[in-house]
Amino acid sequence: MLPYGISNIGSNLVIKSGGRLIALDPVTQVSADLIFVSHAHFDHLMKKVASPVIASKETIELAEARGVKISAFSQELDDIRLVDSGHILGSRALIAGKNETMYTGDFAGRPRGFLGKLEPEHVKNLIIESTYGRKEYAFPSIASVLKIAMDKISKAYDRGLGVSLHGYTLGKAQLISYFFKAWRPLIFDRRVENINKIYRRHGITLPEPDYVIDEPAELPNGPYIYVAPMGQRVNVSPVSISFTGWAIKGRNSSLPISDHADHDELVSFVKAINPENVVTVHGFDREFAKELRKEGFRAQAFGDQQVDICDFM
Ligand SMILES: [Zn+2]
């Protein structure tokens, strides 16, 4: 059974705090007093959100741009605080009660460009994402990865070749736009630019593109930088680089820049908080919980439990 007030309704994670039942990033319909939406990635967002929502205003705007309208929301309540988790624009972790329970949502373990990281705060119960909770996922420094990318781009420009840079449309593509702003001409895919506009409205200094295109067929000849969605075929340009944490295990056309904490950052985050209970969610949740138990923490994976909400109500 999961610790204090943490449980599930179906596949959704819920906590009980201050007499409220709070659903954390539910992906299916759930009956709760409050729904927390940590950020606007689709794996954390229902298609239709009914109950009162707690989320940042940036998340609400990004969700709406992606077709999910949320009418009633608050950014904080008397006994619930949201703190920046550094993952993408507007991403938040939730702290319920007087430092009772923290749910991290997706979070970054290091600053990148205009994004920060989630700072540890002491809580009794920690619900932590564990996307990269396996030892082999230790990311190199951002500076060293950018140097490799800049070298590849320089070589391509010397040969008169265009370069496409791929990342998730929301989040990574904005970081790419920021990191590679000095290269011209700078071409953005329209879906990327639509999200970039929202970032600019919230004060993030993203470069203006020289062109915005709908299809790779519109790419010019000669050197250029094309910022494109992850899913798009990577051979649209003579040189292509994808940016993802999974590049640690991947092909050499991809480089490891992630918006998640890597394994070592996850471990130091838990140690810095030193909670009484840890619940791991997403990715290598079982492996990571096991490792934390070896380190002396009372930890279990959300995926391991089978309790129903009735067990603790
Ligand atoms: Zn995410």
Image: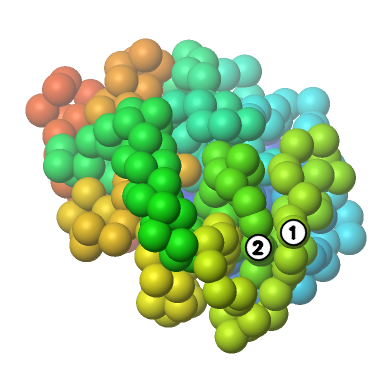
User: Is residue 174 or residue 157 the one in the foreground?
Assistant: 157
Farthest left residue?
Answer: 294
Mark 2 packing: few (<14 Cα in 10 Å), some, or many (20+)? many
Number of labels in the image equals: 2
**Which of disc 1 and disc 2 is earlier in sequence?**
2
Q: Position of residue 128 (x, y in %)?
A: 40, 38
What numbered label is drawn on residue 210?
Answer: 1
Q: Is residue 303 left or right of residue 134?
A: right
Q: Position of residue 109 (x, y in %)?
A: 42, 29
Left or right, 308 with reference to 111: left
Residue shown at 52% from the left, 61% from the top: 223
Q: Nearer the viewer, residue 172 or 152?
A: 152
Which amino acid, mark 2? Ile
Q: Is residue 23 left or right of residue 57?
A: left
Which image quarter: residue 3? top left
Q: Judge by depth and name the residue closer to the eye, 41 or 48.
A: 41
User: Can I make out residue 8 in this image?
Assistant: no
In the rendered image, residue 248, in percent from the top left (x then y), is placed at 22, 49
Q: Residue at x 63, y 51 (%)?
A: 184
Q: Is residue 156 above or below residue 176?
A: below
Ligand 1 within 8 A of label 2's CB?
Answer: no
Identity of the residue furthest to the bottom in this view: 217
The kind of secondary structure element at disc 1 is loop
Residue 272 location in percent, x, y? 37, 14
Of residue 195 and residue 299, the one placed in the foreground of this image is 195
Q: Quadrant of residue 211?
A: bottom right
Give the residue type that dot 1 points to: Asp
On residue 187, the disc is: 2
Residue under the point 65% across and 57% down: 185
Q: Do the numbered discs 2 and 1 sit on residues whose CB atoms are within 8 Å?
A: yes
